[in-house]
Image: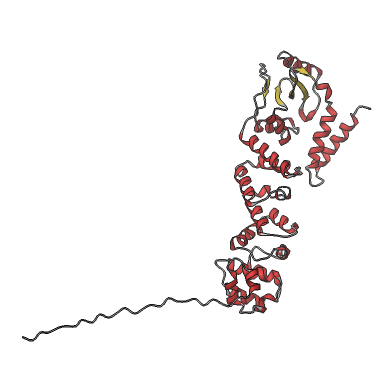
Amino acid sequence: MPSSSKTSVVLAEPVRTPEIEVLPRVSHVLEHLCPHDYAFDIGRVFSFPHTQLLNKSAVHWHIAAMVLANPIASKNNINVIWHHVTDWRDALHIAMASFNRENASIAKKLSLPLWSKASYRQLSGLLEDKKATKLLRHADMVTPEFVAKLYCLNPQLRIHQVLDHLAQEDEAMLIAKMFGRLSDDHQMRLVDSLKAASSRQDIWKKLRTAFISANGDFPTPPEINDPRIKPILSFDQLSDVSKTMKNCLGGFGHAEEALSGEAAYYAFNGDEKAVIQIEPRFGGNVITDIGGVSNKPLSDEVLKIIKQIFANHGLGDETKSKCHWSTTIQCQLRNLANEDEATSHCKHLVEELLQAVEEVPAL
């Protein structure tokens, strides 16, 4: 019986060859200018040897990178800019809408090599803020590191005294997290304090004081058992008393003294309102200052009552070492220094200073 065999044929699936992306030829110059993967993207637009790009100014290099960094912009925008836009400021606005003719000069300060996409996005956001724009205009050079620090800071803390002493972006981020939830009043006082800083050490000392002031209480001062005397135990209380008494207690300088134990403050609510300052001495505490509303002197009768209350609790009197005219002049000079322009309030401060100077005793 003859044998039969069947042969089965299996058809092989076609072999799929992977698509190979052909990268454009890129010069070493372009690689040096574009460390953030822009080199091949720009190389596709400006073919080797990239003369059409490299013959332009550094501003135009940034413009090309800005277009590529924008996720919704068309790469064709680069061709439009190069072939149809004659004014570089108009080209800059096409690349980044937050640029305009008023802030276009900032683009000339942008450092090379070209930036990362994230850095360009941060720059775009900063250009929407007036304080940030002012700092960018006055910078000798605008770098990605400078932009990152400025971007992380709270808008109110965008001042050169802070930026000049920050070493890295993380420090700016730390400050933002520490003070991002402060009230506007706290932020303004912190800014006033930081504007007087002269060193990096001074900046961090003031930031520490501000943080503790906003989040913690002052050390407990000596107890005074009298219903008319209340200790001031926090920065908020100090600030409220300062507003009521119209004096300069609300600054961080006084808060720093209270936090460190160098001084303590009490509010007196009797026939006249007053603020009492005490300081530690060997063997105990003493009264070093008593002031009324707007630092005006109290009546002799009220002064006697206050001093007697504290004397009953073992606190001596050293107020004679501080004169009313000296305290007034120091406080009003500080207030005057915070006035940017000649306003009616500024005029009032000068009038009070003139009156206080008249009270200076002959030496």
Give 212 or 301, whichever is nearer the viewer. Answer: 212
Residue farthest along the top direction in this orientation: 312
The quadrant the C terminus occupies is top right
Give 332 or 132, whichever is nearer the viewer. Answer: 132
Instruction: Please say if 143 is above or below 57.
Output: above
Q: In x, y percent, where is residue 143? A: 68, 59
Residue farthest along the bottom direction in this orientation: 2
Instruction: Please say if 225 is above or below 152.
Output: above
The quadrant the N terminus occupies is bottom left
Residue 75 lies left or right of residue 93; in this view the side is left
Q: In x, y percent, where is residue 39? A: 60, 71
* Protein image colouring: secondary structure
Q: Is residue 146 visible?
A: yes
Q: Residue at x 67, y 18 (%)?
A: 224
Q: Residue at x 78, y 30 (%)?
A: 294
Q: In x, y percent, where is residue 33? A: 65, 69
Q: Is residue 94 visible?
A: no
Residue farthest along the left direction in this orientation: 1
Q: In x, y percent, where is residue 316? A: 77, 17
